[in-house]
Amino acid sequence: MKKRRISKAINIGGVTVGGGAPIAVQSMTKTDTKDVMSTISQIKELEECGCELVRVAVPDDEAARSLSAIKMGIAIPLIADIHFDYRLALAALTAGVDGLRLNPGNINQPDKISTIIRAAKERDVPIRIGVNAGSLPKKINPELTTAQQMVAVAMQQIRLLEELDFGLIKVSLKAFDVPTTIEAYRSIADKIPYPLHLGITEAGPPRSGIIRSIAGVSPLLYMGIGDTIRISLSTHPREEVITAYEILKSLDLRQYGPTLVTCPSCGRAEVDIISLVAEVEEKLKYIDKPIKVAVMGCVVNGPGEAKDADIGIACGKGKAVLFSRGEKIGVVEEGNFIGVLMKEVEDFITI
Ligand code: SF4
């Protein structure tokens, strides 16, 4: 793992992004922003699974008018996503949002950008310049690769903000194409001091979207690039947050909630390990404290992995050996596996 790129720290509604702070996990609501109650309720669900920053789409005046009520109903910073109409950005700032996301491909008149910047500066509200490969401005050198075009557009916008003495900047360069995304982020990382928000845009339905996101985001994180992430999936945004934490945990960049070590099962398994794992995973879902739990299926690899976890169980025929903090602490009869394991987990996290 390469040393992390240390970017300039910015504060988004109390969450530090950049400057070596923990990589923040973001998501975006999928409700109609005008429906205040549904939007608040979805954000609350996201808060419960560890989302640290949430973005809402602001497509029209009515959505902009809902922002202050949404802001009052939630505990995490609220970011307004604005396309096309700069007046909506001004309305969002007046409503008290903690951050703005602008797509330079959609608001590209410098005078309108300047108006937004002045209003954001008065309120110390950071702005993400969110460049998407699919919506680049038309006037861009066609001889450049898509990644180079994305970087060029972002640099243009950054210079404009800097000329207005605005430095609360975060940048994203998202594409559906993984090599394009990696190339764009790698290229801009050395050119600017600002924090980078990572993601693969429109990554897809859960299975392929998760794989595509991991393929795009992980190499960048491994290179030390990235200050926040959002995994875009065509499903409930809770899955985006869970996936983001799984990626960060796998790379040892964050500790959050349980890490499950499980045997994939094979001809040696003497219990239905797949059902057992599914049940344990469900029960662990809302734990936010870091804990490594192993559920293993036989005596070959089972005891070693179970011993290595905080709490582990190595199942055999009709019985399982239970481990806590590397020590064997008992033998459990089949039928009690989950109850006994979860009791140990509860004890571990409440100490
Ligand atoms: S732990 Fe045992 S049952 Fe599970 S995959 Fe490995 S050898 Fe097979």
Image (spheres, rainbow, N blue to C red):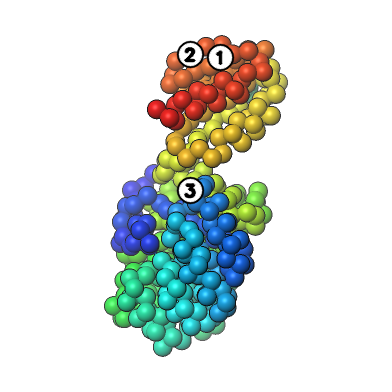
Residue beneath disc 1: 321
- Residue 12 position, x and y percent, is 38, 62
Alpha carbon distance from label 3 to label 2: 32 Å
Residue farthest to the bottom, as pictured: 111
Alpha carbon distance from label 3 to label 1: 32 Å
Dot 2 alpha-carbon crowd within 10 angstroms: few under 14, some 14 to 19, many 20 or more: some
Dot 1 alpha-carbon crowd within 10 angstroms: few under 14, some 14 to 19, many 20 or more: many
- Quadrant where the N terminus sits is top left
320 displayed left or right of 291: right
Whether residue 62 can be seen here: yes
Instruction: Name the element at disc 1.
Output: strand
Q: Which mark is residue 50?
A: 3
Alpha carbon distance from label 1 to label 2: 7 Å
Residue farthest to the left, as pictured: 165
Q: Are marks 1 and 2 in contact (CB under 8 Å)?
A: yes
Write the residue at 64% across / 31% down. Answer: 279
Q: Disc 3 or 1, which lies upstream in sequence?
A: 3
Instruction: Name the element at disc 2.
Output: strand
- Residue 129 position, x and y percent, is 44, 71
Instruction: Name the element at disc 3.
Output: loop
Q: Quadrant of residue 16?
A: bottom left
Q: Is residue 141 above or below residue 302?
A: below
Write the residue at 50% across / 35% down. Answer: 259
User: Does mark 2's beta carbon lie closer than 8 Å to ligand 1?
Assistant: no
- The amino acid type, in three-letter code, at marker 1 is Val
Depth order, front residue of 231/151: 231
- The amino acid type, in three-letter code, at marker 3 is Gly
Residue beneath disc 2: 328
Q: Is residue 177 above or below residue 244?
A: below
Dot 3 alpha-carbon crowd within 10 angstroms: few under 14, some 14 to 19, many 20 or more: many
Depth order, front residue of 121/139: 121
- Quadrant where the C terminus sits is top left
